[in-house]
Image (cartoon, rainbow, N blue to C red):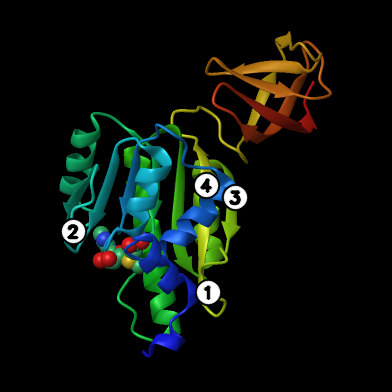
Amino acid sequence: MVKDQRDHYYWKAKEDGYRARSSYKLLQINKKFKFIKKGDSVVDLGAAPGGWLQVAKELSAGKTVGVDLQRIEPIPGVTTFQGDMTREETIDNVKEFLGGEADVVISDASPNLSGAWDYDHARSVDLAESALATAEKLLKPGGNFLAKVFQGDMFNGYLEHVKKKFSRVKVHHPPASRKESAEVYVVAKDLLKGRPVKPGEVFDIKITSLGKSGDGVALIDGFAVIVKGTCLGDEVKVRIKDAKPHFAFGEVIERNG
Ligand SMILES: C[S@@+](CC[C@H](N)C(=O)[O-])C[C@H]1O[C@@H](n2cnc3c(N)ncnc32)[C@H](O)[C@@H]1O
């Protein structure tokens, strides 16, 4: 490739000391969604050569860990493991280093591209599913997740899987991604791990108290579900609309009493 064909972000990365143009994608996505905060511990799956790791360290200044099949040249303040992100051994190494669970897991992992669109799309979704499964094992309840996926007909299925696990999920194409690129980023906040109710689930409940706003409240396994338009003693079928760390909102889909 001759110099003039390389894009703005390629040269900017050289100037700013980043290892990859992809650093700007992470900076742009975090500027918009703020899923990495100061002090967070961050795990980057598929991290070589380390452009995202450099940015993750700058943004969080917390424990920052990179995993890749390839070796990653050392980065000050960053710990790296060479290995497959799907292997239990790799996951155990990361957990041991963190001394607990992570605040954020990010994955820019890509398969080696064959050029055959459908095949590359399927492998990218498979890798994004692996990143999701690994993130569930590494993240603390309420943690955030970011994953790259190549668009195609399996994308919506993947998005549904992520939506079942996190309370807020968005799809984004950052300006630093080439316009013609099929890649998009799934930004998922607030891992629902450990919560007894999840968005979309349906329960038969009885309203046993009223909240400050006057809305009915029912307890499911000791977890408060607030249901608008209900009164004390109402027996209703509700669908969970949103699950926060300490309570959820449900909407009435049927009145039983
Ligand atoms: C596009 S690069 C990541 C670039 C990186 N975000 C950066 O800014 O430098 C994708 C990486 O995913 C890695 N990868 C693919 N499958 C993996 C797996 N199963 N486990 C770990 N890394 C994997 C590849 O080795 C490759 O280095």
Distance between the Cα atoms at labels 4 and 1? Answer: 19 Å
Q: Quadrant of the C terminus?
A: top right
Quarter location, residue 214: top right
Callout 4 touching callout 1 (CB < 8 Å):
no
Of badges 1 and 3, nearer the viewer stands 3
Quarter location, residue 141: top left
Of badges 2 and 4, nearer the viewer stands 2
Q: Quadrant of the N terminus?
A: bottom left
Between 222 and 138, which is closer to the camera in this rendering?
A: 138
Distance between the Cα atoms at labels 1 and 2? Answer: 33 Å
Q: Amino acid at mark 1?
A: Gly
Q: Amino acid at mark 3?
A: Lys
Which residue is depicted at the point 39% across and 57% down? 129
Of badges 4 and 1, nearer the viewer stands 4
Crowding near the residue tagged with mark 4, few <14, some 14–19, many ≥20 C-alpha atoms within 10 Å? many
Give the x, y percent position of residue 247.
60, 22
Crowding near the residue tagged with mark 1, few <14, some 14–19, many ≥20 C-alpha atoms within 10 Å? some
Q: Which residue is mark 2?
A: 73
Distance between the Cα atoms at labels 2 and 4? Answer: 29 Å
Query: Nearer the N terminus, badge 2 or badge 3?
Result: 3
Query: Nearer the N terminus, badge 4 or badge 1?
Result: 1
Q: Which residue is mark 1?
A: 152
Which residue is depicted at the point 31% across and 63% down? 19
Q: Is residue 38 left or right of residue 93?
A: right
Distance between the Cα atoms at labels 2 and 3? Answer: 29 Å
Decide: is 230 above or below 5: above
Q: Amino acid at mark 4?
A: Ala
Of badges 3 and 4, nearer the viewer stands 3
Distance between the Cα atoms at labels 1 and 3? Answer: 24 Å
Q: Amino acid at mark 2?
A: Glu
Query: Nearer the N terminus, badge 1 or badge 3?
Result: 3
Residue 188's mark? 4
